[in-house]
Image (cartoon, helix red, strand yellow):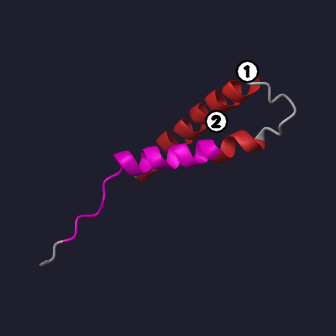
């Protein structure tokens, strides 16, 4: 199950990084290094991963 989640997270990271780089290139950021686009894409992929992952369920008396 973890392997599938990692593959999905990497696919989301790649797709969102590609989309972000296309948006930045259309906005005129032609000389920007390519790794700059992957930093916000990693954040977006991590947020998607957290949104769809199974959170641990703690049993406790509150």
Mark 1 residue element: helix
Residue at screen point 15% across, 76% down: 60
Q: Name the residue under label 2.
A: 17
Count neighbours of disc 1 (C-alpha within 10 A) and say few if under 14, some if 14 to 19, many if 20 or more.
Answer: few
Q: Residue 26 carries which label?
A: 1
Q: Does residue 5 show up?
A: no
Q: Position of residue 26 (x, y in %)?
A: 73, 21
39 sits left or right of 49 in the view: right
**Going from the N terminus, do you reach mark 2 or mark 1 first?**
2
Q: Residue furthest bottom?
A: 61
Q: How crowded is mark 2: few (under 14 residues within 10 Å), some or many (20 or more)?
A: many
- Residue drawn at x 36%, y 50% is 53
The percent position of residue 55, horizontal first and vertical second, equals 30, 58
Q: Residue at x 66, y 47 (%)?
A: 39
Disc 2 to disc 1, C-alpha distance: 14 Å
The answer to which of 62 and 34 lies nearer the viewer is: 62
Q: Which mark is residue 5?
A: none
- Residues in magenta, as a range: 40-58
- Look at the image and tell me in which quarter the C terminus lies: bottom left
Q: Is residue 44 magenta?
A: yes
In the rendered picture of this protein, how many numbered marks are placed on residues? 2
């Amino acid at each position: 199950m973890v392997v599938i989640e990692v593959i999905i997270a990497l696919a989301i990271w790649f797709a969102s990084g590609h989309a972000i780089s296309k948006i930045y290139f259309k906005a005129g950021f032609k000389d920007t290094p390519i790794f700059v686009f992957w930093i916000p894409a990693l954040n977006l992929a991590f947020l998607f991963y957290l949104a769809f992952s199974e959170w641990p369920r703690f049993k406790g008396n509150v």
